[in-house]
Amino acid sequence: MRWLVATVAETIPETARAITLRLDVSNWPGHRAGQHVDVRLTAEDGYATQRSYSIASPPGIDRLELTVERIDDGEVSPWLTTVADVGDQFELRGPIGGWFVWDGDASAPVLLVGGGSGVVPLMAMLRHHAASGSTAAMRLVYSARTLGDVIYRQGLEGLASPHRAITLTLTRESSSDWVGHRGRVDVDMLAELGWPPSVRPHCYVCGPTPFVEVVADALVGLGHEPARVRTERFGPTGG
Amino acid sequence: MDTSPLDGNATAGALGELFAFDVTMAVTTCAHCRHTWPMADLRAYVRAPGIVLRCPSCGGVQLRLVQSTERTWLDVRGIQMLQIPAGATV
């Protein structure tokens, strides 16, 4: 797989720490919802470093969108989130991964569970669900620290529909104005907001490694088939 | 530094340079414990001079990859068997 040149066409702030980069990528072959890319930055002295970032845009859109959360001591995300500007170029390789994908051709219900910026590949699936007119029922449970940390807040509200149920849960929101769910995603929350195992949903779980471990174990504990629980872990080890 | 492992998804780009199939779809049989796992689910340790993939069941090392500008070293002695679905070839 060759490295491609991406040119920043637009930058869209999402939260205080996260930004969406809308990119023109030469010879982009297209992608599936849930895939990621490797981004490589090379310094003038030749030092190169790379990280993986999920694709936020659905298949079939001209410009590729990556949403990146800044890790303060990271090597790649600080540049992508605070320095990269319209016209800047960097290298990327992709699309990568045929495991953590949802193509929209199955009618089985779908449960998406995201923690923090783990919502990014799930957003591509939600957008693909909307764009493709899929009749599969899709539910998202998205855990963020505070309301200010919620990526795509407006976009998610716009995507909510009878076929797409979207639930936020906040783990550290102090404002009493928030009347939605609070606390970490656990067995009880998944039993309430997810699907019963009997309808055999496809489950996609993405977030920091500890979040993914807890949620995947809880889903299997509820009776979901392990083979239908697909996971993608990322972490502060990214950056 | 956070030392939580990532998973095989995070290494698919680097391994994709070497293999003619999507490694996230391939299934390994661990040479240590014989459990089978999709490579996407293997535990990936990437903050090191190379990449190490470990078995989620027993923690045994399945794959090590080190790359320099001159050459690549690949150690797969921890994988007893690799199953590659027909649709995973690229």
Image (cartoon, coloured by chain):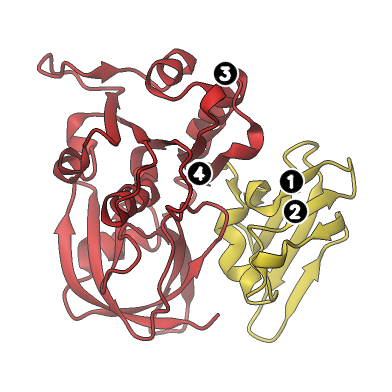
Chain colours: A red, B yellow
| Coordinates of residue A64 in the picture (x, y in percent) | 30, 69
Whole-Å distance between the Cαs marked 1 and 3? 21 Å
Of pointers 1 and 4, the one earlier in the residue sequence? 4
Whole-Å distance between the Cαs marked 1 and 4? 28 Å
Quadrant of the image occupied by residue A143:
top left
Question: Is mark 1 in CB contact (under 8 Å) with mark 4?
Answer: no
Whole-Å distance between the Cαs marked 1 and 2? 5 Å
Question: Is mark 4 in CB contact (under 8 Å) with mark 3?
Answer: no
Nearer the observer, disc 4 or disc 2? 2
Q: Which mark is residue B1?
A: 4
Q: SS for tag 2? A: strand
Query: In the visual, does B62 lie left or right of A165?
Result: right
Q: Which mark is residue A188?
A: none
Quadrant of the image occupied by residue A156:
top left
Comparing A167 with A178, the one in front is: A167
Name the residue type under label 3: Leu
Comparing A122 with B4, the one in front is: A122
Nearer the observer, disc 1 or disc 4? 1
Callout 1: chain:
B
Q: Quadrant of the C terminus of chain A?
A: bottom left
**Residue under disc 1 on the same chain as residue under disc 3:** no
Mark 2, residue position:
B27
Name the residue type under label 2: Val
**Residue under disc 1 on the same chain as residue under disc 2:** yes
Q: SS for tag 3? A: helix
Mark 1, residue position:
B37
Question: Is mark 2 in CB contact (under 8 Å) with mark 3?
Answer: no
Nearer the observer, disc 1 or disc 3? 3
Nearer the observer, disc 4 or disc 3? 3
Mark 3, residue position:
A222
